[in-house]
Image: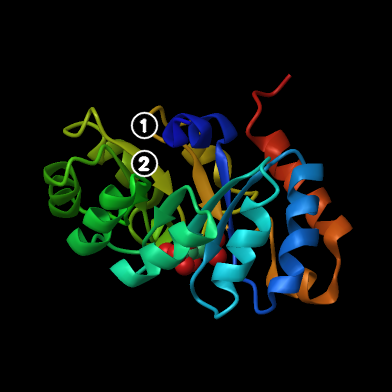
Amino acid sequence: MDILAALAEARLVPVVVLDDAKDAAPLAEALVAGGLPVAEVTFRTAAAQDSIRAMADRGDMLVGAGTVLTPEQVDQAVAAGASYVVSPGLSRAVVERCREHGVLALPGAVTATEIQAALELGLTTVKFFPAGTSGGAAAISALSAPFGGVRFVPTGGIGPTNVQDYLGIPAVAAVGGSWMVPKDRVRSGDFAGITALTAEAVALTRPAA
Ligand SMILES: O=C(O)C(=O)C[C@H](O)[C@H](O)COP(=O)(O)O
């Protein structure tokens, strides 16, 4: 599967933080019901690997790992079934381990220097993080001028009120964010509410009628 093409088709990447892996299955169901069978499960908690496995085992989702800081976490993510690996920053060691496993690396990069470093590692798509405090949509538009072949996945500080600012930029492949999957709703078991938030987010990716 062309993961980049699949992410670009989805246009949105829910950034998931789970404290308990038992929430992975109902959350996956909620995302799929909302029309977005995609999740980036972050390694911010000890539940990451089991949560990735629970979602990946469904077979109908595009499941990645987020907050991947080390090659060892790449190994854990791939072992659990992640098909792409997202990092807050750009790490040669993480990118190279992803390449060894044959999975997509999506490292964070927000400056021209970081983007050039990503290009030197053979990457053409980067996570633009933290988008909200790094110049936002205007910065991506400016960077896409000299880096015409680079695509961006802006993440960080994006929500319903500004997601379309990013989606309207041709160089933006998809937008990542946690607004669709708020931790408090996961903790409270409000998966119907997550389905509604997801459906609303998906609707924002579609051109106005
Ligand atoms: O944890 C990671 O892998 C990161 O690199 C950072 C997250 O993608 C952002 O923190 C999400 O930002 P919000 O949508 O504003 O909550």
Is there any visible trace of residue 178 in the rendered image? no
On the image, which quarter does residue 122 sit in? top left
Residue 27 figure quarter? bottom right
CB-based contact (under 8 Å), mark 1 and mark 2: yes
Residue at (37% x, 58% y) in the render: 129
Quick check: 46 left or right of 170?
A: right
Disc 2 residue lies near ligand 1 with CB under 8 A = no
Tell me the distance, in whole angstroms, between the alpha carbons under discs 1 and 2: 6 Å
Q: Is residue 68 visible?
A: yes
Q: Nearer the viewer, residue 3 or 134?
A: 3
Q: Which residue is mark 1?
A: 171
Residue 152 shows which numbered tag?
Answer: 2
Q: Name the amino acid, label 1.
A: Ala
- Residue 198: x, y in percent? 74, 48
The residue depicted at 20 percent of the width and 34 percent of the height is 147
Give the class, few, some or many, for how many residues have Cα within 10 Å of label 1's Cα (few <14, many ≥20): many
Q: Amino acid at mark 2?
A: Phe
Q: Which mark sits nearer the N-terminus, 1 or 2?
A: 2
Residue 180: give x, y in percent of width and height: 68, 55
- Give the farthest residue toward the top: 209
- 14 and 132: which one is in front? 14
> For mark 2, does the 10 Å Cα neighbourhood hold few (<14), some (14 to 19), or many (20 or more) residues?
many
